[in-house]
Image (cartoon, rainbow, N blue to C red):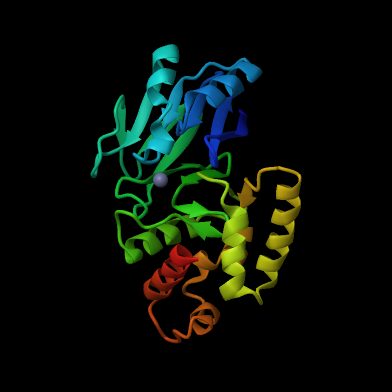
Amino acid sequence: MAAEIRVFNCLSDNFGYLIHDTETRATASIDAPEAAPILKALAQENWALTDILITHHHHDHVGGVAELKQKYKCRVVAPHEKKAAIANADLRVANGDVVMVGNLMARVLETPGHTLDHVSYVFDREKAVFAADTLFSIGCGRVFEGTHPMMWDSLLKLRALPDDFSLYCGHEYTAANVKFALTVDGDNPALKARAEEVARLRAQNRATIPVLLGEEKKSNVFLRADDPAVAAALHMKGAAAADVFGELRERKNKS
Ligand SMILES: [Zn+2]
């Protein structure tokens, strides 16, 4: 049993992802920012789309769903409606549900905050997590619909996954995230190493994703809001982690 994952660009800075089961040839798109690049990636591999796994209702994650569903008659899996309805959904999922893509198994992890409906898909056997706009490399999503404590709790759920899992996130924001992170966490050697790696990858126009979760745990300041060193850097010694996280998020919003 084996899975193949393809990473490509959609829209201006979204990632497109296909995960393919080599045994059954089932293929899922994680979100569908727009149809054209997904159709192109499928054609390149001679894969047929069987499933779309949607993480949340934002247009830059569902804009291509209708066209892909019309062409492939694929199943559309979407989070349970919390605020905005996702059109064309065949299956609604909630925390702990398991979604099969052929013989590949994805576990649904509710990770609200960016939106209330946001879910992440965890492929335990493949050691891959698709976290969309909850956790970015060296950053995290904006908190639009939820609260800072809710988003911090979601980040803790993702942080609890093993270090050797690969993170696949929703956007190529890593370089901007590094720039901000260095302003509060500039003495962190893991961040400095990641900054060099990201600069090299972007200079070659290459994606900064996937990245190992173990690396993110060391280098992503948003995952370290409960580290006393981060609180101290923000002059918030002794503050609750969710408040430190909130301050980080506010500063990033203004950066
Ligand atoms: Zn979003």
Is 132 located above or below residue 195 in the figure? above
In the rendered image, residue 60, in percent from the top left (x then y), is placed at 43, 37
> How many numbered tags mark residues here?
0
Give the camera-side residue of 92 and 199: 199
Residue at position x 48%, y 24% in the image: 35
Residue 152 lies, with reference to residue 137, above or below; the image says: below
Q: In the image, what residue occupies the spot 69% across and 61% down?
A: 195
Give the percent coordinates (x, y) of residue 225.
47, 72
230 over 142 or under it: above or below: below
In the rendered image of this protein, does residue 252 appear above or below residue 137? below
- Position of residue 139 measured from the top left corner of the image (x, y, whole percent): 52, 59
Q: Quadrant of residue 96?
A: top left
Which quadrant of the figure shows ligand 1? top left
Q: Is residue 139 left or right of residue 45?
A: left
Quarter occupied by the N terminus: top right
Q: Quadrant of residue 77?
A: top left
Asked if residue 116 lies left or right of residue 44, the reply is: left
Query: Is any atom of residue 54 visible in this view?
Result: no
In the image, taking residue 85 as reference, residue 167 lies left or right, namely: right
Q: Nearer the viewer, residue 74 or 204?
A: 204
Name the residue rendered at 36%, 41% in the picture: 56
